[in-house]
Amino acid sequence: MLPLERQKKILDLLMIKKVLKLPELTAELDISIDTLRRDLNALTSQGKIEKIYGGVKLVQAKFGESSMDERMVKHLEEKESIARKCSELISDGDCIYLDSGSTTYHIARHVKHKKLLTVVTNSIPIVQELMDSSVELVIIGGKIRHHEQSVIAYDYLFNFQGLNIQKAFICCSGITIDRGISDYNLEEAVTRKKIIEQSGQVYVAADSSKFGKDVTISIAPLDRVDAIITDHHANAELVHKFKKLRTNLVIAE
């Protein structure tokens, strides 16, 4: 197993069990303690884990992620163009998921006129935006995350196997070609992973400032994403690299 694969495995294990002892990790990964220490040093230097006595835990970043209110007023022109492009992918009669985020909030503003549309969401601002429309609303159950104005699912409340989510529009805080999409909050990332697993098509709505960032928690590799919709400020070299990938990069003008 390559170092990057081992390090991803370590992060995945920490998402399940928030604190792990070093003997547990060496046994699970079948590696020596020296190899494990090199991987843990790499993850620590990236700010993804924190060493504690005899083990490690995930870092819950408090300062890397700006609040929803702050993000609502940043890159407005870019988010508006992304939202318009995303709304073109949504048809009458669809059942879609709109993630918590400032860009997906703008999508909600553009789909009010759609007929027989069902929107599943964990975003309180999106629920408020669509409350007086004819859109059928389904909000996931769980704990309120005040900072993000979102609902983060607990396993015993998250049971949407009966819902046919045709298109999911996901937000994230970081995108890299090698590591895929990532976010700062563990519970938000778990919710997005579950939605990705059971959605027919997955779209990431993200302005160009998110590219080149690999933040605390991995959500999914790019091969799990059908398309990324971003703004016209996307780097030309990056656009060229995406031509070789399965994931489509859509530039909203």
Image (cartoon, rainbow, N blue to C red):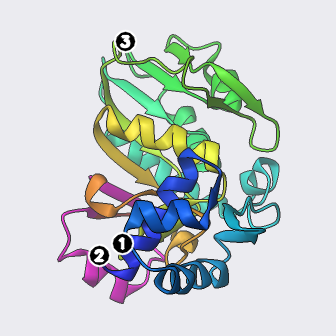
Q: Which residue is mark 2?
A: 1
Q: CA distance from mark 3 to mark 1?
A: 43 Å
Q: Counting other residues with Cα less than 10 Å from the Cα at mark 2, is it few (<14), some (14-19), or many (20 or more)? A: few
Q: Residue at x 42, y 53 (%)?
A: 204
Instruction: Name the quadrant containing residue 86.
Output: top left
Q: CA distance from mark 1 to mark 2?
A: 6 Å
- Segment tinted magenta in the rendering: 226-248
Instruction: Name the quadrant containing residue 145.
Output: top right
User: What amino acid type is highlighted by mark number 2?
Assistant: Met
State the quadrant of the N terminus: bottom left
x and y percent of residue 153 in the render? 60, 28
x and y percent of residue 178 in the render? 36, 76
Q: Which residue is mark 1?
A: 5
Q: Is residue 180 above or below residue 160?
A: below
Question: Who is closer to the viewer here, 76 or 227?
Answer: 227
Residue 151 visible in the displayed image: yes
Q: Residue at x 62, y 18 (%)?
A: 141
Question: Who is closer to the viewer here, 15 or 249?
Answer: 15
Question: What label does residue 194 carry, if any?
Answer: none
Q: CA distance from mark 2 to mark 3?
A: 48 Å
Q: Is residue 219 above or below residue 244?
A: above
Q: Is residue 126 above or below residue 8?
A: above
Q: Residue at x 70, y 22 (%)?
A: 128
Q: Is 235 one of the magenta-colored residues?
A: yes
Q: Which residue is mark 3?
A: 116
User: What amino acid type is highlighted by mark number 1?
Assistant: Glu
| Label 3 vs 1, first from the N-terminus | 1
Q: Residue at x 51, y 64 (%)?
A: 25
The secondary structure type at the circle numbered 1 is helix
User: What amino acid type is highlighted by mark number 3?
Assistant: Leu
Question: Who is closer to the viewer here, 32 or 99?
Answer: 32
